[in-house]
Image (spheres, rainbow, N blue to C red):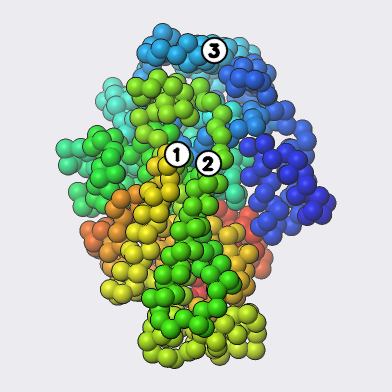
Amino acid sequence: MNTDSVKDIVRKNATLTTLKPYLRKYIYLEYEYKKIVPRGLKMLMSQKRYKEKRVIDAIGKLLSEVEIKIDSNSELVYFLDENKTIGSAASIIGNMTIDYSKFIENGLSDFVGGVNVDSSQIVAEQSKLLEAIKVFINRIIDELKKDHGSNVKKKICCFENMLDKRAESFYDALQRVLFLNQLLWQTGHRLNGLGRMDYYLADYFEQDINSGKLSKKRTKAYITEVYRLLHNDYWFKSDSLPGDTGQIIILGGLNADGTYFSTQLTEIFLEVQKEFASPDPKILLRVSKKMPNYLLEQAVDCLLAQTGSPLFANDDVIIPCLIASGIEDSDAYAYVTSACWEPFIVGKSFDQNNIDSMNLMEPFCAMILNEDLTKYSSFDDVFEKYKNYLREYIKKFIHNLSSITWERDPIFTLFTENSQKNEDIVCHGAKYFHYGVTTAGIPNLVNNLLLLKNAVFYEGKYSLSELESGRKNDWKELGNLQNRLREDANYFGKDNDDVISTVNEITSLIVEYLKRYNKLLPEIKFGLSSPAYVMRAKSLPATYDGRNNGDPLIPHISKAGAAFTEIVNFAAKLDYSDNRHNGNVVDFFIVPSDIMGNRDKFINFFKIAFHSGIFEMQMNVQDSKTLIAAKQEPHKYPNLIVRVWGFSAYFRDLPVSYQDILIERAVSDERR
């Protein structure tokens, strides 16, 4: 199967929202087509897609025909029929976390007639949805009655309770989380988060622990089984890369009264994450100055398990940003995140936080390709020209977003607090309604601009003619010049006023242009972290910072070989106000022995980082020697896990381009 024929198949099936991203990764990300594409094509050709004029009718048919698979050896019920899903010409919302607590605390009968809206269409859709879910549950019960495995009666009782009762136990609540989660995956939703599991399960955990029905050991066994079940279908669930499932569990966090929330259940989740040792699901730990020291110590031990978890989100910075942007205080304190790191208000928000990615190097490259910069006499003139290109880029970006149409979503609408408009969630039927975008390329942009400002116009170290000639030839036979440029253009990440003010000026321009030209869409928020630093760089020409044609961009908030403290100081001084809070991740590579031999030192480093005011942080705890060996002999390292974007993945599953980036970063940071 050649690449062109695969591309044609994807084009012909452009409306298959579930399969399009699943196959796209095989086309553009350098996989071995002969091994992997046929698997995707087989699914494409065999998968039944339920299409009706109304999505609610398609959901009803789907749930009445889904193959029910009961694992007699598992204490919990969880399955996906990968051969059936919803088909729609419009986009199906995703990258969200549903309000699991609403289903835990209510039986389905409690939802009937409880929809306080005037729209007869909403009432009809939700009544039909509830009936379809009941039919699905009764089908599961019928299959369970045929099963001869252990705890069948307990499983049946759980599903019967879903019809008209709130959850009665910790086990019962866990089963509801799994059921609602599988319902989302089955109906074509992508990147489904798990929310604050330690928070919404806390009362059930305490109740059963205090009554003697549950022990810590039994709790760990249940959660481990949840991890196993969620991880089983990670290939099917993955979006752009294997492991990119969005299955993130949020732990801890500030309460509105200023105290920090964590329980023994929080610790158990961290223990399971450490011991289960898989890339998915993953954990985000909400941190604060108020968090107990032992929890941070446990999080560091979890990192040493080398699963890439947890990612850290700083409540002391994020919550004030959310409140300043118009989120009510109580909602801001209850935030979760979307697939990776983008703050999201569960049960009250439509926010599509990964709707697209802005590549800030695209307008810069358009400028250097279309303008004769050798005629410019000052950096200010060049920067003004870039502003013009950036403005036009954002205008076009907004226009492209306006072409997106959304399929009505009765499932998320049912579990989302209705706004006064009393509409479906995609029609402003939620309390909060935003688009969220990520941004790639700002490190390279800053490096290029400051190189021009300092080394060309101020110091006269290079001429623009010299740089243009080298760039156009992709630095061929100019290795010495290219290396010098890479050294001289190494600005982003420095704790330097000029660098920091340049970053803040650029993001302020983005804020201004988004507000000026976005008249019809929801408010657009953005962040400085993006997974597009590889894919969106392939079409870019060589640039003045010594980067070659098509080379990847610098990921997230990172600086190869720099001291950890310098990057932290830099990140803490960036401006995250206005709408700049859609994920801002400081990204590190750390050799495992550096933590193991200096555990207390690293715990103090984390404290300093959070107290200084960074937004978020993630880490790869790996060494270059292991990564190089795993690339050469992958069969010897089948379970090696690395942090990729805001998720973790098996190293063996990654395209060569991503493996090389990780190896390069590991080598560079080991020279720190």
Q: Is residue 300 visible?
A: no
| Marked residue nearer the N-terminal end (3 or 2) | 3
Tag of residue 115: none
Q: Crowding at label 2, few (<14), some or many (≥20) Cα neighbours within 10 Å?
A: few
Looking at numbered disc 1 in the image, what kind of residue is underneath it?
A: Leu
**Picture layout, residue 54 above or below residue 245:** above
Confirm or deny contact between disc 3 and disc 1 (CB under 8 A): no
User: Residue 223 versus residue 430: which sits nearer the camera?
Assistant: 430
Looking at numbered disc 3 in the image, what kind of residue is underneath it?
A: Lys
Tag of residue 402: 2
Q: Distance between the residues labelled 1 and 2?
A: 8 Å
| Marked residue nearer the N-terminal end (1 or 2) | 2
In what quadrant of the picture does the C terminus appear?
bottom left
Residue that numbered label 3 is attached to = 128
Tag of residue 520: 1
Q: Distance between the residues labelled 3 and 2?
A: 31 Å
Residue at point 66%, 29% (across, down)? 87
- Find residue 363 and report its horizontal and vertical position in percent: 52, 64
| Marked residue nearer the N-terminal end (3 or 1) | 3
Confirm or deny contact between disc 3 and disc 2 (CB under 8 A): no
- Find residue 650 and report its horizontal and vertical position in percent: 58, 54
Tell me the mark number nearer the camera, choosing from 3 and 1: 1
Residue at point 28%, 62% (across, down)? 572
Q: Crowding at label 1, few (<14), some or many (≥20) Cα neighbours within 10 Å?
A: few
- Find residue 124 and report its horizontal and vertical position in percent: 51, 11
In this rendering, would 411 be left or right of 200?
A: right
Q: How far apart are marks 3 and 1 (CA)?
A: 32 Å
- SS state under label 2: loop
Residue at point 40%, 35% (across, down)? 433
Confirm or deny contact between disc 1 and disc 2 (CB under 8 A): yes
